[in-house]
């Protein structure tokens, strides 16, 4: 009886090793031998599973995008109030600090999106998936009266994701120019302006409650 193939497991191991190598070396200095060393394999063995380093890094990027977006979806899934959902969404999109490995990984991999169409496509997928989450929250908030949008939901969503990307990069730079708390406050201020709803109170989102029904006062 033929032994079951372990190719899937080996590829998963190589993705994990390449992830570590990118975080240790950065994309500019990364070489196939760095990934091989992290995986405790020979360069030739790495190429047996992935024809090129580029092919391997595409899988690293795909896995990172899926993991990041899934975490953001999970952060807002169980919150029914659109205002609390919007605050949670903002908080889930920023790096925790310069050492946030997943965000650093995404920024490193994003550096080659300008030159490689396949990496750019994955970067676009990351952007559009986040825009979709934001748009859904904003549309529900507008429909329920929690938000009074100053622009269409899609436009606001795209601006918020772009702001997150910009502030996030400043957070993880070798010399950070803004910290996570400050970036979060600035994003919540922008979201407040765009929705007509103050999301910036220190106690938010706990202080956010459903609007009072005027009929309750007559009961």
Image (cartoon, rainbow, N blue to C red):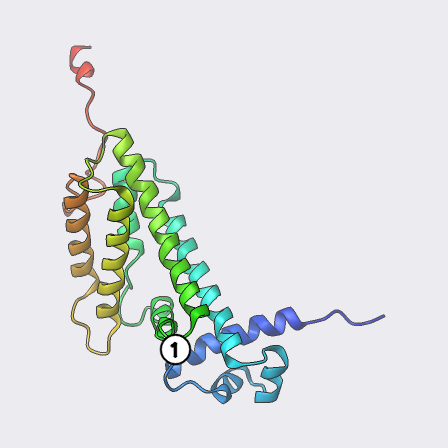
Q: Residue furthest right?
A: 1
Q: Nearer the viewer, residue 5 or 201?
A: 5
Relative height, residue 140 to residue 165 (above, below): above
For the point 16% across and 60% down, which residue is it? 182
For the point 28% across and 52% down, which residue is it? 158
SS type, badge 1 = helix
Q: Which residue is mark 1?
A: 23
In percent of width and height, residue 178 lies at 17, 67
**Quarter of the N terminus within the rendering:** bottom right
Judge whether residue 80 can be spotted in this image.
yes
Judge whether residue 81 can be spotted in this image.
no
Relative height, residue 133 to residue 179 (above, below): above
Quarter residue 184 falls in: bottom left
In percent of width and height, residue 50 lies at 58, 78
**Quarter of the C terminus within the rendering:** top left
Q: Nearer the viewer, residue 8 or 161?
A: 161
For the point 43% across and 70% down, which residue is it? 117
Relative height, residue 187 to residue 53 (above, below): above
On the rendered structure, is 150 left or right of 63?
Answer: left
Relative height, residue 120 to residue 194 (above, below): below
On the rendered structure, is 119 left or right of 91?
Answer: right
In percent of width and height, residue 144 lies at 27, 29
Q: Residue furthest top?
A: 219
Q: Nearer the viewer, residue 4 or 146?
A: 146
In percent of width and height, residue 56 lies at 52, 75
């Amino acid at each position: 009886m033929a032994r079951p193939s372990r190719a899937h497991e080996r590829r998963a191991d190589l993705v994990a090793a390449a992830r570590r190598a990118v975080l240790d070396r950065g994309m500019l200095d990364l070489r196939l031998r760095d990934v091989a060393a992290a995986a405790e394999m020979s360069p030739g063995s790495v190429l047996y599973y992935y024809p090129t380093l580029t092919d391997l890094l595409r899988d690293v990027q795909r896995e990172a995008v899926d993991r990041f977006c899934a975490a953001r979806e999970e952060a807002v899934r169980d919150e029914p109030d659109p205002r609390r959902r919007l605050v949670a969404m903002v908080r889930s999109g920023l790096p925790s600090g310069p050492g946030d490995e997943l965000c650093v990984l995404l920024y490193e991999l994003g550096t080659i999106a300008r030159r490689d169409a396949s990496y750019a496509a994955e970067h676009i997928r990351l952007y559009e998936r986040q825009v979709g989450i934001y748009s859904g929250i904003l549309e529900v908030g507008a429909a329920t009266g929690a938000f009074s949008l100053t622009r269409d939901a899609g436009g606001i969503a795209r601006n918020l994701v772009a702001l997150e990307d910009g502030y996030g990069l400043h957070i993880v730079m070798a010399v950070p120019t803004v910290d996570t708390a400050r970036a979060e406050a600035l994003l919540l201020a922008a979201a407040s302006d765009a929705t007509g709803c103050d999301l910036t109170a220190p106690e938010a989102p706990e202080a956010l409650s459903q609007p009072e029904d005027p009929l309750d006062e007559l009961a």
